[in-house]
Amino acid sequence: MPPLPPAAAVPRPPPDLRAVVLAVSGWAGALAALGLPGWSWWVLSALAAVLLVARRCRRRPVLTLAACLLAASAVGGVTALRADALRHGPVAALAGERAVVTVTARVASDPVLREGRFGSYTLTRVTVTEVAGRGRRFRTHVPVLVIGAEAWRGAGLGSTVTATGRLTAPDSPDLAAVLSTGRPPRVLTRPGELLAGAARVRAGIRHAVAGAPPAARALVPALVVGDDQGMSADLVADFRTCGLTHLAAVSGTNLTLVVGFLLLVARWVGVRARGLVVVGALGVVGFVVLARPEPSVLRAAAMGSVALVGLGARGRDHGIRALGVAVLVLLLLDPWLASSVGFALSVLATAGILFLGPPFRDALTVWLPRWAAEALAVPFAAQLACTPLVAALSGQVSLVAVLANLVVAPVVGPATVLGLLGGVLDLVHPGPSALAGRLAGLCASWVILVAVRLARLPTAALDWSPGLVPLLVLAVLCLLVGLGAGRVLRRPRWTVPMCVVLVLVMVRPLPTPGWPPDGWVLVACDVGQGDGLVLNAGGGAAVVVDTGPDPPAMDACLDRLDVKALPVVVLTHFHADHVDGLAAVLTGRRVGEVDVTATQEPAYGAEQVHRWARTAQVPVRVPSYGEVRRVGALTWQVVGPVTTGAPGGQEEGEEGSVANNASLVLLVVVRGVRILMAGDMEPAAQQRLDAAQPGLRVDVLKVPHHGSRYQDPALLDSLGARLAVISVGKVNDYGHPAPSTLRLLHHDGMLVRRTDQDGSVAVVVRDRRLRVLTRG
C-alpha cells in the first residue's frame, strides 16, 4: 500500500468534500438506473447527504444540491442509455431467439481456462463488431462473453476473430449476450506491436521465476500484473483470510509500487518538476498496457493514480479531490462499475487511507518513529474502511489482516519491482533475468509463508452473519473505531495491551458457548458451496466425510469441535467442492487413511488428492462395496455406489454426472441413530441404491448434491427420515437447494436444516432423543 501524505505542520481546515459528494451522488444515480435493490442507492444517497452536512455548507447550498442532482442524473442517464442499448440491440434480439450466428469480434480479455462438469472450457470477453444470423447481418459494438473450447486460449488480447456459435441471454447486465461455441475461432488479425510487446514481458516474468518454488512462481506474476491463474485454491483462500487479496489482483497497490519505482529512478537520474509528471503518466500507461487494458486494470490505474497524487504537497486535500473526480469519471466511462465489488473495495481502501490514515499516523508518531507509525496506519485504515463490505461477501471479519499486511510490506515492493525487472531483462539476456527472478521468488516465498501461517491461526477470522442488521452493526462499530482510534493510538499504555489481547485471541481459540453441543453425533460444517461433514467417534476422534471447498473454514470447524485425530477421512468423489479442504484437514491432526471412490473423475481432482495425501504420508484406499467399518462409537457400511457392468459405473445413455453418480454412500449408525451420507448421487445412482437396499430406513438424511433438483422422489419418500441436512453455500450459482427438492422433503415429513441459512448444523442425541442445533 502507498505511504501516507506528509503530516501537516499546523492544523488545517477540514478537507474539501465537494468532489466526493458529487461522486457518491453519481454512484447512487448509476445504481438506481441499473435497477439494483433500492436500499443500495438510498444508502449512498444518505451518505452524500451526511457528507454535505459535514461540510457545513453555508455558501450556496442550493447550488451544491443542484450539482449533486446533476451528477446523479448524468451518471444515471448514461447508465440507462448504455443498458438500453445492450438490452434492445440486434445482438440481444438474436440472443432472445437463441440463434446460431457468426460474429466478428475483437478479443477484449485474456481467455481464462475453467474446469467444468464435463471438462475444460474457456471464458473470453469480446467486443462484437458484426453479427450475422437468421438471414440478417448487423454492424454493432457490444460486449459478449464467449464460452468456448480450449482452442480459444490462442486468441490473444487485441486479436480480431470470427466465430460461430449459439447466442443466449446473459445473466450480467454489462453483456449483450453469451456466445457458446465448441469450434475454435478463426484469427483475422493479431494484436498490435504494443500489446504483443506487453505479452512478451509478461511471458518474461514467468520465465524469470521458473527456478522459484511452485507457489512463489505463481505469486510473482500476480504481484506484478495481477496474473493469478497459477495460484492454487488453497493459497487464494489463505490470502483472502489474511486480507492480502489486493496483492494478487490488479490493484492500486501494484501500480503505486511500479510507478513509484520509476519516479525514484527518474529522480536519481536528475528528472525534476514536470518531467516527473511525464514519467508518472508514462508509467501509468505502461502499467495499463502490461496488465491488460481491461476494466479492472483501468480501475486500479485510477485508484493508484489517486494514491500517487496523495503523496505530493497538500497530498491529502489533492488526493481526496482526485478520488471524487476519478470515481465520477470512471462511472461515466463504465457505469457497470457501480455494481462491481472490486471497484467498491478499491474506492473504500483508497478513501480509508486518505481520510483515516493521516490521523492514525499522527497519533502513533507521538510514541513511534514515523516509518513505523505509517506502516501500521496504512493497512489499519484501509482494512477498517473495507471491513463491512468484506464481511458481507465472505461472512468473516479478519483479525490478522493488519498484521499480515504489516509483516509482508517490506518485501512486497522488492518482489514486484524485481519481478518486473526480470520480465524486461528476459528480453535482453536470461542470466540477469533469472537472478532478478530468484530474488523476487524469495520475497514472494516470505509473503506465502506469512499468509499460510497466519491463516492457520485458530482465530484468524471471526464469523460474521452477512444479514442486513449484523452488517449495519458492524458498519457502526467500524465508524466508532474510526472516530475514536486516534485517541487510543496516541496512548501506548492503551494501545500495547489491546494489541497483546488481540494477539492472544488470534493464537488461542475463542470459546464458543454451547458449541459443540453435548451429545453431538454429526456436524455439517458451514464451508460454503460444498460438503464438509464430521462424525463424532468419541475421545477427540472423528471421521470426516468430504472436506469442502474452503480450507480455512473446514480447519476452523474441526478446531471448534476439538477434533485431534481422524482415523478415516472419506472423500465421496473428487469434485473441488468436496476435496479442496483436504490439505487443511491433513495438517496438524493424526490421520489414519483417506478413503476414496474408484472413479477417478475429474482427473485433476483425483491427482490433487493423491498429491496432498502423499505429502502428508497418509495412505489412500478404495473401500469395497458392502464393506463394514467400526471406529469408536461409529459403525458404517458402504452402500454406494451400486456398481454396474458399464465403464465408470454408469450405463450408456444414463443421465447425470459420472463423478456424482460414483459418490461413495455411507450408512452410518451412531448411538442408535441411522444416518445416510448420500454424497452427490443423482437420480440414476439413487434408483440403483433403492433397488439394492429395499426397505432402507434412516433417521437423518444428508441430502444428495446440496439439494439440487436432480432427486429420485421414490427414494426420498421410502427412507422415512425425520431430519434432512443440506450442505450448501449462500447465494450460489446453481440454485441450490431447489424449491422442488425442498417441497419433496417437507412433503415426506422431514425437518430441513441448511448451512446457508443456519450456519453449521449439529445432529445431537440426548436422553435417547434426536435433536438438531445450529451455530449461526
Image: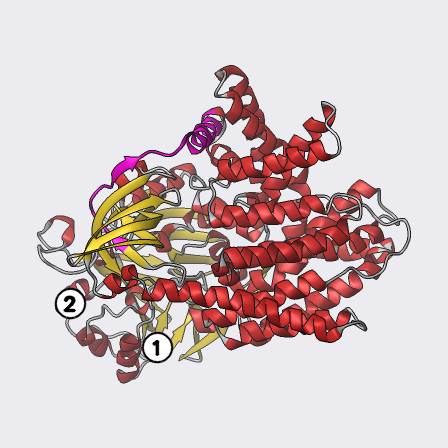
Residues at marks 1 and 2, CA–CA distance in whole angstroms: 21 Å
Image quadrant where one finds the N terminus:
top right
The amino acid type of the residue labelled 1 equals Leu
Q: Answer with left or right where residue 451 lies relative to residue 712.
A: right
The amino acid type of the residue labelled 2 equals Gln
What numbered label is drawn on residue 687? 2
**Residue at coordinates 60% horizontally, 35% vertically from top-left?**
283
Would you name the residue on which mark 1 appears? 723
Q: Is residue 195 magenta?
A: yes
- Residue 455: horizontal and vertical position, in percent? 56, 49
Q: Answer with left or right where residue 59 lies relative to residue 436.
A: right
Density class for disc 2 (Cα within 10 Å; few <14, some 14-19, many ≥20) is some
Q: Is residue 751 magenta?
A: no
Classify mark 1: helix, strand or loop: strand
Region of the chain picked out in magenta, as a range: 179-207
Q: Nearer the viewer, residue 276 or 123?
A: 276
- Residue 598: horizontal and vertical position, in percent? 22, 48
Q: Answer with left or right where residue 572 lies relative to residue 415.
A: left
Name above or below for residue 565 compared with residue 750.
Answer: above
Q: Answer with left or right where residue 140 lies relative to residue 366.
A: left
